Amino acid sequence: MTLRPLPARRLRSAVRWPAATLIGAALVALSACNQRQAAAPVPPPPPEVGVITVAPQPIPYLRDLPGRVAPTRIAEVRSRVSGLVIKRLFEQGSAVKEGDVLYKIDPAPYEVDLASAEATLARQEAALALANQQAERLETLLARNTASQAQYDTAYAAKKQAEAEVAGAKAARDRAKLNLSWTDVRAPISGRIGRALLTEGTLIEQGSTGVLATIQQLDPIYVDITQSVGELNKLRRDLASGELSKLENDAANVHLIMDDGSLYPLAGRLLFSDVTADPSTGQVTLRVLIPNPNDELFPGMYVRARIKQGIDSDAIAVPQQAIQRTADGKPEVWVVKEGDTVMLQPVEVGPVVGQDWLIREGLKAGERVVVEGFQKITAGITVKPMDRTVPHESETGKPHDPDEAGDGEAKRQAASQVR
């Protein structure tokens, strides 16, 4: 078989066709490559987290302790004389002032006694005047030698006896006046009076110890709080070693938390701590003086007292939400290290002060602690730290509730375990 060469026109057409095909295939491959490059995922930006920079600061050592309200002064109204109660002159539960008449006892018998005592005094004063005249006359006669010394001595003794009788009569008159004045039963102190324990028509017998009413002074008022002996001794050791600074003697260092959780607006001052511990509870009583101008505090009320017992001048604290818990309950915090990577760091926490945890060990000044965005981070990743300012108790005005804090921490711990 003999092969004949193709004509030149067909040869040129055969050469052009594979070149066009190759160019088209190259364009298709380039478009597919561009599509693959466009579909490639873009790495996400680092997650933003809120952080605070740890810095030493003076933090007061606060303790929330239970307490009972007690009056600063209490007086039982009693009658000093016997008689029939004829009138009550006060409104029950009202404020009274010292010296106000509260009850009126029938004064008629004591008016008669006073009149009799005054008559006796007048008689004795007349006898004294006669004795004085007799003594002066005999003194003159004795100087003229017309009376004996014995006569003068007798007259002088009668004069002195009359003077004594007058003094006794004056004392009896004053006693009668005093008894008459006691028929007005007066308030011994200023304060708020309770209910009337006797009514009109009641006969008060001689020597009776019955109480007519009770007056309590409520402004200012006492709050007796209790603290364990162990806490009190540790506080004293910390103050002695200089770990805590002492407060000024006249500083208002106590705030009350009412039963509804609100903060009593006026601060009080710690007066003293008792020198005897309760053997059944091992606690010591501390007495606080609190202003009570509007009578919002009543004796017997239960309150919680937030007491400032010292100041830690270089303490480190973090917000409560910054504290995480391990599976076995140990505290730790997320710390932003160099290169903006985050790591978990164990810490040792102290008491809750306001809305912050006091950190005893594990953090130092200048470290950045995460307070927001925990759900976005894992150990070792790079983050974008954003400075945050967490309001303290003094800024929010809301008192710290240890029970609520415990619930919040438990919820955060459960959430972190789920994540």
Image: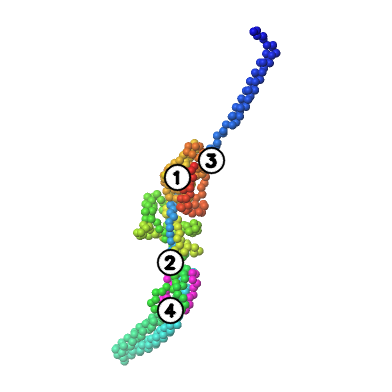
> Looking at the figure, which quarter contains the N terminus?
top right
User: Disc 3 and disc 4: Cα gap in Å?
Assistant: 84 Å
**Circle 1 sits on which residue?**
325
Query: Which mark is first along the chain, 2 or 1?
Result: 2
Amino acid carrying label 2: it is: Arg
Give the residue displayed 36% in from the left and 57% down from the top: 282
Marks 3, 1: nearer the viewer: 1
Query: Which mark is first along the chain, 4 or 2?
Result: 2
Dots 3 and 1: beta carbons under 8 Å?
no
Estimate how packed mark 1 is, as few (under 14), some (14 to 19) or many (20 or more) residues with alpha carbons within 10 Å.
some
In this view, the residue in front, 316 or 153, is 316
Magenta highlight on residue 26: no
Magenta highlight on residue 75: yes
**Circle 3 sits on which residue?**
48
Amino acid carrying label 4: it is: Leu
**Circle 4 sits on which residue?**
203
User: Disc 2 and disc 4: Cα gap in Å?
Assistant: 28 Å
**Residue 73 circle label:** 2
Marks 2, 4: nearer the viewer: 4
In this view, the residue in front, 179 or 399, is 399
Query: Which mark is first along the chain, 4 or 3?
Result: 3
Secondary element at tag 1:
strand
Q: Where's residue 350, x and y in %?
A: 42, 48
Q: Which residues are magenta?
A: 72-94
Q: Is 139 placed left or right of 396 in the picture?
A: left
Dots 3 and 4: beta carbons under 8 Å?
no
Amino acid carrying label 1: it is: Arg
**Residue 237 circle label:** none
